[in-house]
Each structure stands twice: as C-alpha cells, then as structure tokens.
Image: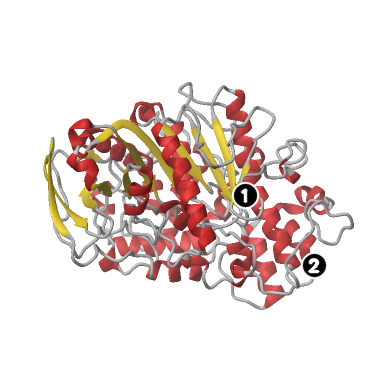
Amino acid sequence: MHTTLFFLFLSSLFSAALTSPWHVSRHHNKQQAKRQQAFPKGTNGVQVNCNLGQAQGFVDAASGVARFAVKYATAPRFGQPVMASQWMGMNTTTSLPPVCPQPGVDPSQYSEDCLYAMIYAPMATLISAQAKKTPVYVWFHGGSFYEGGASNPGLDGSKLAVATGSIVVVVQYRLGVLGWLPPSYGPVPTGNLGLSDAIAALKFVNSVISFFGGSSSITVGGQSSGGHLIRALLASPSAASLFSAATIHADPVAYGFMKNSVYQALQTNFYTSVLTNCPCVPSSTACINQVPVSTIIAAQNNFLFDGLIQEVDASVGIGEPLRPHDGDGGLIQSTMTTTYPSTKKPLLITSNRDDAAPEFGTDLPFGLPIGEFGLIVDEFVGDTRGAPLNASTFYNPCLPGLVQPYVQNGDVLREALDRYGTDALWRCPNWDLARRLAGQGWTVYVGTFEAGATYPSNAGIDLCLEPGMTCHEDEIYIIFGTTPSPTASQTALTTQIQTRLKSFMANPAVAPNAPGYPTWNPATSTNANAIQFGGSADGQLVPIFACDPSFWGTPTVPFEWQVYGE
C-alpha cells in the first residue's frame, strides 16, 4: 500500500501529525495498560510432578483453576530456541512473566528471556490427571508481530478452560526485529525465530501436558498476527505432528508470507541504514549481542513507525510489516495462497464486522464529506487498483443503488472506509482462503463476529463506540469469557462461542456444533458458508456482498498477496 502518500495526504487534509496508519500513539498507549492483574489474592499453592520436575502453580479459589507460569525454552539473542530440560516456573503469586521486548512498555516489564507460557488447568483435570483425556487449547497472542504477550487484557484462560473442559495454554514468542529480522551475520540469518519459538512451545506442551491430565488432542488458536502465526504453523511440516486442529481469528489473510527477497532487503536496510548507532564494524555476532536492547527497540520504532520499512518495499504493507517469510531454511514450505500442506487439519476462521475501524477511527475525524472516499482509496492502492473500487456500489457512498446501505448517521465516510478495509484485509481474503482449502479437501468453518465486547485498545476510538460496531480485537473478551461486567447478550454470545469451541476441541473432525445452536456447515470450494455470531441475525449466513469470488481476488480487484506474488 502507498503508506507514505497516505501519511502526507492525511496530514495535509486534516493538519494532523500522523505517523502511521497503525497509529504509534494508539499502540503505545494501549501497551501501558496491557498487563493483566497478577494472580488473584487468596490463591493457594499446588504442585504437579511432571517429567521435567515439580511444577509449582496457584489455584484461584473462585474459578477452581490452577495457573502455572513456566519458561518453555531459552534462546540467545538472534539464536534458535532450546526447549527447557527442567521445569522453570515462576513461584510467586504476585508476578506474571515479563513480556518480550517491544515498544510502549517500560523496560522493567520486558526481558529478552521471555519465552514463557501460562498454563490454566481446572483442578478437576489435575485430580484425574492419570486419565489424560482433557483437550488442550494453545493460544498465540496478536500484536502485529511487534507487541503483546501472555498477560494481554482478557487472556486469562481460567474461564475458557472451565467452559470448554480444556487446559488452556497462552504462549509468548519473540517479537519485532528480535523475532522476525535477525542480522544476516547472526547464528540464524534465515530468521522466522518467532515461528521457531511457537514450534518449541508446542513441543514443550506435548512433552508435559499429560502430567496435567491433558490429552494428545491439541488445538492451536490465535488472533490477528497470532492467527497469521497459526497459518505459518500449518505451512510448516515440522509442526504438523504437534497439533490436531486450529482456530484463526481476525488474521489479515491479505498479507501472505513475506517473499525471501523482501526479507533480505529489509535485513540489509535495517542493519546498515537504520541501526546506525550500533558500533558493529565489522559486523559480528559478538558485537551485536553487546548492543543494548533499548537501542534495538528504538531503531525498530524508527523503522516501523516512520515509514522507513515501506520505503524499502511496498509489499510489507502497514499492518504486519514484519511477519513470517518463505525461504527460511525449511520451516515454511507452503504459501497457503497457491500451494498447500499435504497434512490437512480441521480449521475455524473468523473475522469481525469492523476489523478496519480502529485505524480509520484513529486517523480520521468524525463527519468528513463522503466525496473524499475515492481520493482516500486511491491513496491507499493507487489509481489503477482504486478505480474499480470507487466505481463499485459495494463501497462508494457517493453512488446510487448501494448494495448494502450505510447506517452511521453523519459518519458515512468512515463507515464506508471501514467496510472497504475490512473486506480488503480480513473478511474477503479469509473467505477466499477457506474456499481454496476446501477445494484441497480441508474441512474449514467460517464465521463473522457481528457483536463483541469493546477491547481496551478500542475504548478511546469514537468509531468503535458507535452502535453496531465490532472492531478488531473485540472478539477476545468473548472467546475467553473475560468481558468486564458483560451484558446479557455478551454472556449469551460467550456461551455460544465457548460451547462451539468445546465441541470442536473434543472432536474437530465432526463439527463446532452443539444442541440449541444453528448448524455451522463447512465451506465448499465455491461458498464460504460463513455464519454470523451475535446481533439480530445470529446463526444466519453472512451475505456475500463484495466477497463474491467474481469481485475480490480477481485480476481487477486483487488481494495484496496477489499483487505482490506472495
């Protein structure tokens, strides 16, 4: 996308000093409040003897769930993870694991020694651990591959574990350049270290989980970039035996795996032109290991948030400019766009009604004239790609006979841009992936959250607070059952989603269906069969609108991965 032009356009139009469509201040502010409360007061200790030693955990009396914070691997800077050979837990009721180094977090809250997982196991599971029959759900957090952690708001897995009768594991992995852009002269120049971390975490879970009562039936799940990480795991034969099924939520599937040539160009540019205050001449691993992590994060911030990375190659996009890439020495062996893994796994894919709204709501003020729609779309994708979008009654609010009328009084422009952005990066490429996989013999279920619970990062965005909006990340509280003071409808939606997840985890080859809820049919090669979650049309099929394969995904209206050959 033409990110730099978009910055200049918005700045000149609104006299606002915007720095990135993935707004720096938004991400930095939300990170300051992104840690959960530590273990609740009044918790009691519990021990589990496992193959790696004695695991010390704590039981929340209110939920009856034992929590274990454990280091699943260690890794030198820019090196491969080494799975733990003994239990390395945190034996305090007042602490949560440090997150991996990232922007917007006080350095006292992060550490390069950050490869931790949180295990949430109902006490009933531990008491009957010898049965080893409890399904396991391993979750990978989102955050655009440069922020986030196991202590993100809402990721307390206690209620999800109880509701689904499962053991929930929330995993951290390396972020930013430390996880996705190591130097070419380092020990792993091919990168994808965050993916290697995820594989190490799954190996660790497979090794120890039976001692907690867990079965060999492991489902992986992730939201946003965590969902993209699940895509990478599906494309990695070395991970194929480590899990049985997957759920992907709000993954911007329009971004394919980065081409290796682009990765190498970013690698060269960052370590020669951006990390300029690094005294590593000649370049060497010993030297780069002595650079303070704060220096690396500061350079990374310049690279990501000042538009420098898009100047290297436009294909990096704006949402996940650092992400998994091909040509990594053998981990990723399928594109998931035109080539597919031979090992097929049951899969759930969901998106949100308004995944793009946080960005337009942050960067654009309320009440702009609808006549600006075409200009803004052209600045995003260029005149050639913008022309069919601007001429389409799927989106352009200036045209008569809109296929789907807009409903936000006085805010039609941002609603139109939200619809376009959500279709372009999330909903339509998600449906396209489901149809492609179904054509290869996969079983894929597709859904859209038409309702949710406002996530903290969206609480200050006026567009996300307008009636009927379900923004990016607003499904997290619903999935985990952690909505603060939920309404009756939010409680009902959480119950439905968790009931469907319970069915899927218990027997993913059957279906995420349960008595009392509408049947959720799998996608076919021609129809995503996406159903709605929440709202007045709960359980009904989502209208296809612009996600018809005769519109999005064609040479006239291509996805990002098609434009850049990913």
Q: Is residue 561 visible?
A: no
Q: Secondary structure at mark 2?
A: helix
Q: Closer to the N terminus: mark 1 or mark 2? A: 2
Q: Nearer the viewer, residue 387 or 424?
A: 424
How many tags in the picture? Answer: 2
Residue at the front extreme, as displayed? 516
- Residue 540 to residue 69: above or below: above
Label 1 neighbour load within 10 Å: few <14, some 14-19, many 20+: some
User: Does residue 186 appear to the left or right of 505 in the view shown?
Assistant: left
Q: Nearer the viewer, residue 510 or 253?
A: 510
Q: Nearer the viewer, residue 149 or 405?
A: 405
Label 2 neighbour load within 10 Å: few <14, some 14-19, many 20+: some
Q: State the quadrant of the C terminus.
A: top right
User: Does residue 341 appear to the left or right of 218 in the view shown?
Assistant: right
Say which residue label 1 marks: 538
Please, what is the three-letter code of the amino acid marked with disc 1? Asp
Give the residue displayed 46% in from the left and 67% down from the top. 456
Please, what is the three-letter code of the amino acid marked with disc 2? Ile
Give the residue displayed 45% in from the left and 44% down from the top. 499
Say which residue label 2 marks: 370
Q: Is residue 214 visible?
A: yes
Give the residue displayed 67% in from the left and 69% down from the top. 10
Residue 179 spot, x, y in % from top left: 36, 48
Q: CA distance from mark 1 to mark 2?
A: 30 Å
Q: Quadrant of residue 246?
A: top left
User: Mark 1 touching mark 2, by CB under 8 A?
Assistant: no
Q: Secondary structure at mark 1?
A: loop
Residue 33 spot, x, y in % from top left: 38, 70
- Residue 442 to residue 315: above or below: above
Give the residue displayed 62% in from the left and 42% down from the top. 531
